[in-house]
Structure formats: structure tokens, C-alpha cells
Image (cartoon, grey):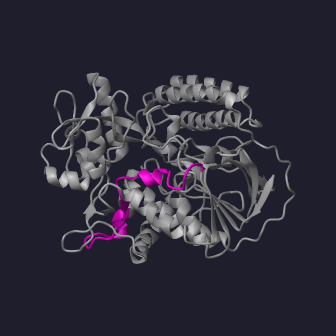
Amino acid sequence: MKQFDFDFVVIGSGLAGLMAAFHASAHGKVALISKSELDVSNSYHAQGGIAAAIGMDDDPINHFNDTLTAGRGLCDQDAVTILVEEGLAQVRNMIAMGLEFDKEPNGELLLGLEGGHSHRRILHADGDATGKIMTGFMLQKIRSIKQITPFEYTTAVKIFAENGICLGIQAMDYMTGENAIFNSKATILATGGLSRIYARSTNPHTATGDGFALAWQAGARLADMEFIQFHPTALSMDGEDAYLISEAVRGEGAHLIDCLGERFMLKLHPMAELAPRDVVASAIFKRMQETGSTVFLCLKHLKASFLRERFHSIDAKLKSVGIDLTSDLIPISPAAHYTVGGVRTDVWGQTNISGLFACGEVASTGVMGANRLASNSLLECLVYGKRIVEKAKDLPKPTGNQLPIQPVELRQETDLTYLIIKNELSQLMSNKVGIVRNRNGMAEALKRVNEIIEHYPDNQTDYNGKKIYELATVCRLICISAMEREESRGGHVRSDFPEESDNLVHHIIQEKGKKISTEKVRNNI
């Protein structure tokens, strides 16, 4: 089995991973590991933009307050302060590096508005292609840095941790089936989210929660796994994927109407269509149940030429399925979009395992609370991708005994089994642990998930069997945390506990081999 020695191993090539690799390259050799091509990630598909209080009438304190409001009392205030203050500096730094955001005719930055924001502070690049432009910009930088070695079509299959110290990882090359060991002083998880464990998801097919399961197996603490954010407006058509229709569309004035033609959000929230995502997604779900029909986005009242330019990617996608963005009603319904909880870190991205860090969607830095504020995710990638390196660069190389290695094998004969169970789990999670949950449904889901885990234990050498175990483990973590939180808060809505509880303003923590516990929200700035 091959062995590689690097100073830093970054797992994941979304914006968080790219930023971590970029900054780490100034301090040593970096391995950048990606399950597919480097440009396949949630970041790449991000349409809405990146939030920063950069406008003349704005201030980081406004951004701070909006983030806390959206987070429903579970944001760690020190982490949010870092996000809005250092994030503003990082956005300016990206502009200084040559990244071009969209501008007004007078040369000023064009700032958009999205749900939950009190000011126009969303920067976009090439209209609705912000993620593509930002990740492409960083990829171009990274490909020219000799200190960074990319490993495409490579997946991490194990994190090595001994006595609370991370020693590196085992990985497998999809193309050859060959396993390799990556030794490093710092292992950085930037593996993205897990929303593809749901039947309807806006995420790429690679977003199946590998990083969460790997971290859990290694002994890392996970927090707030009950909070899955469902994007309110994903295309809803038979035979079509849940294509994301950016919140920026509502930011520019699109209306939500039901099958009766009623603009129902006006009665439900003072911000109407621009209420925080959890509010809008729940309202759409309830309206669909009441009417037995889908809900629609209506842009007929807006200027057609502006819409086609501003949302050219969305316009092209809708045209391909026979919908005119400017004149037709667009059928939408919520879809699993963003993992709010994740691998628990401090404000430097350090987990409870020395040398193991996490950033981006896989991490729970304390920024998101119970519900992510729109367009904070790309900002978190910039800020915490950099902060990790500030801490990790000074770590010594770990000294630990090499653990026994079992190669993981690709076995074509189990491909179908994996797909069957993956589809079963996605339907189970959507039906029982979706936008609205209750104890009975979640208990049914947990029972079946436990049966699958028992049948496919964690020591599988067959890659498909290992993936089944990891998928089921992630589902189990979500179910347990969601059953523990007996209230409705943010992205976690329970029909049997419809109100928020003042007694549950805490993070729910899970750690392998330990009882479920809680952690106070950090309110000391």
C-alpha cells in the first residue's frame, strides 16, 4: 500500500477545502483529495451569492444580528462575530486578488437581498453563478501552486486517530481501486453536506455525508444533527431533479402563490417571501398539504430583460424543461439543501481530536444555529478555511504507532445492493425525518436504520458495504438528535412539539461510545 507524507491533507474541493489548501500551501506540502473532479461540489452549484456587510449603509453588527435572528437562539456569538468581521475582510481580500463580483453601471458593487437579511449585502458573480465563479477562481490559483498535489476520484475511507491525536487518513482511488495512506500533521475535513441522503435534494450526488461518518468513527464530537435546511424553492416536475431556484429570485421580487392564485406568505410573516428559509419552507409544505397541490413562483410582474440577464443559468435550465422564467408559473417545492449541524469545532476549526479540523458544511462552528442565514455558507468557507491554517501550521508532526490497515475493495457485484439500500434510506428519511417530523415516524425510521447498521457493520472491506454503513450511521445520528429535541426550532419542525422551548436552548452533542449530551450556547463575545 502506498504511503504519502504531507504537512496538510485536505479532504474535499468545495470552497472551504480550496481556501484551506490555498492558505496551507504557504506553510508546507498539501494533499487535496476529491471524490470526483475538483470542480464538483455544493460550492460550485451555489447560485445565491456571498453575504458581507460591504455596503455604505450596512455594518457587520447588522449582519451579526440578522444571523442570530435566523439561527433561532442557537448561534454561538463569538463564532458569528468572527464570521461577519473577518468575512468582510476576506471578501475584500478576494476582490484584491482579482475576483470580480457583479457591479452597477457606475462601478459600485451590485448588492442583492435575500431572506432574513435587513440590508442589501449579497454579492454575486456572473449573475446566478457565484459558486462556479468563486470556486473556479480559487481552482485556477491552486493549480499553479506546486506545494498542492491534487488527488481526484479519490475517497477517504478512514481517519486514523490514536490517544486523541489524528495521524492521517486511508484513501482509495476509484479508478484503480488502490488504497493509500496519507500521513500528516493536520487533516482538514471539508467534505460538504449530506443532503443526498434525502429523496429530493439540490446537492450533487457526492453529498452523502462521508465526512460526518468518518469523523464519528474516529471519535469526533458531532453537534445539532437534527437541523437539516430544506430550500423552499426547488423545481418540482415529474422526471426532473430538484433544481435549485435561488433565494435571490425572491430577493428581486418574485412572489409565492398557491394553486388558488393566493400570495399566502403575506399573512404569515412581515417579510413575506423574504422570511428566513425555515419559515418559508414550512409554510410551503403546509400549503401543499392543505391544497393537495404544488406551489408556484411567479415573476410575471418583474422586468423580463433584467430577469434573463440576472438569472441566466436558471433561465436556461427552465427553458430546457419548457418553462419561461418571465411569463410562466414555476412549480416548486422544498428540497433538502444544507446541513446546519456537523462536526463540532472551536473557532479555529479544531475538533476534539488534535490535528483533525473541519470547515464548510461538514463543520459545526456555531455560526449557523438552528437555521442558516442565506448566503452565509460561502462566507464561512472563506473565514474558517483560513483560520484552520492559522492554528494547524504550528502543530508538530504526530508520533504514533502505525495501525493495522485493511484495504477497502471495489466489488462490482454489490453495486446494486448499495443502490437499493441507498434509495430505501432516502425515502425513509424523506417520509419520516423530513421537513415536519414526529416521534412515531422517527422511531420507525430509527428501527430500520439500526437493522441496516447491524447487517452492515463498520469493519467492511467491501466499499459498497462500507458506504451502506456510513449512510445508515448518518441517518441514525440525525434520528437520535431529532428525537432528543422535543420542540420546533429553525430547520427542525415537530408536529408533536410545535412550539419552541426555553429549556432547550443548547447544542445536542453526540460522540461515539458516550451518552448523548448538551452544550451551552456561547453568548460571551
Is-magenta flag for residue 47?
yes
Span of residues in magenta: 35-63
Q: Position of residue 451 (x, y in %)?
A: 67, 24
> Closest to the observer: 497 or 260?
260
Query: Which of the 4 image quarters holds residue 245?
Result: top left
> Closest to the observer: 233 or 129?
129
Q: Is residue 368 left or right of residue 444?
A: left
In the image, residue 313 sits, relative to residue 387, either above or below, namely above
Is-magenta flag for residue 41?
yes
Q: Residue at x 55, y 57 (%)?
A: 13
Query: Which of the 4 image quarters holds residue 400?
Result: bottom right
Query: Across the whole image, how many numbered discs are drawn on residues?
Result: 0
Q: Residue at x 52, y 60 (%)?
A: 16
Q: Position of residue 73 (x, y in %)?
A: 44, 51
Query: Which of the 4 image quarters holds residue 143?
Result: bottom right
Q: Is residue 71 left or right of residue 441?
A: left
Q: Residue at x 64, y 26 (%)?
A: 417
Q: Position of residue 371 (x, y in %)?
A: 43, 48
